[in-house]
Image (cartoon, rainbow, N blue to C red):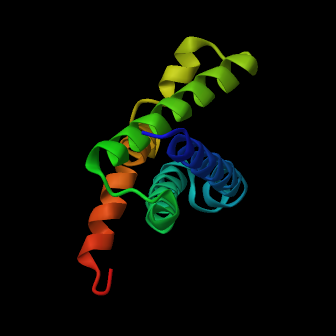
């Protein structure tokens, strides 16, 4: 994988990070207060997963690769960056390890583990979606 491709993948992940932060703000300010925690968490997880796949889909032409090994590498890279960010930011906020690991359960409607799986699969899923559309 070239440095240019890695740089593009990191830039796309930064955009996904901004969308994830906006999704979290929406969840905390609107979804949970209006719908309750379980429904708010589920909707937030579904929305973020859809956003990640959408970003991957629309960024594929810019990435300029459809090689499965590259797509898998990008997805795994996004997963690693996400985990590094989550744990680093959480520890910087003074959260305990046990508190951080609570996010990796399905308690109360939490879909974070599925969002992480979607993050890793998103470039490959997006390429498959793109192949399935006429004219692509």
Expressed as whole percent of the image width and height from the top left, the position of residue 109 reads 43, 46
**In front here: 89 or 67?**
67
Instruction: Please tell me whether residue 78 is drawn above or below residue 56 in the rendered image.
Output: above
Q: Position of residue 27 (x, y in %)?
A: 63, 54
Q: x, y (%) of residue 102?
A: 49, 25
Q: Residue furthest bottom?
A: 135
Looking at the rendering, which quadrant does residue 113 occupy? top left
Q: Nearer the viewer, residue 120 or 28?
A: 120
Where residue 76 appears, as percent x and y from the top left, is: 40, 36
Position of residue 129 relative to residue 93, above or below, is below
Q: Is residue 98 left or right of residue 88?
A: left
Rendered view: 116 above or below 42: above
State how many labels appear. 0
Which quadrant of the rendered structure holds the C terminus?
bottom left
Q: Residue at x 57, y 61 (%)?
A: 35
As drawn, 2 above or below 25: above
123 or 42: nearer the viewer: 123
Residue at (30, 52) in percent of width and height: 67
Whether residue 2 sits left or right of residue 129 in the image: it is right
Q: Name the image quarter holding the N terminus.
A: top left
Who's the residue at 74% across and 18% down the image?
92
Residue drawn at (75%, 21%) of the image: 93
């Amino acid at each position: 994988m070239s440095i240019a491709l890695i740089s593009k993948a990191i830039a796309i992940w930064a955009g996904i990070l901004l969308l994830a932060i906006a999704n979290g703000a929406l969840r905390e300010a609107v979804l949970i207060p209006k719908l309750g925690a379980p429904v708010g968490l589920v909707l937030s997880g579904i929305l973020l997963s859809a956003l990640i796949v959408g970003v991957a889909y629309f960024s594929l032409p810019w990435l300029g690769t459809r090689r499965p090994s590259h797509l898998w590498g990008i997805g795994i890279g996004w997963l690693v960056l996400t985990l590094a960010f989550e744990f680093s930011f959480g520890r910087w906020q003074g959260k305990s390890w046990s508190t951080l690991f609570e996010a990796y359960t399905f308690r109360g409607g939490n879909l974070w583990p599925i969002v992480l799986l979607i993050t890793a699969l998103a470039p490959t899923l997006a390429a498959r979606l793109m192949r399935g559309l006429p004219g692509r």
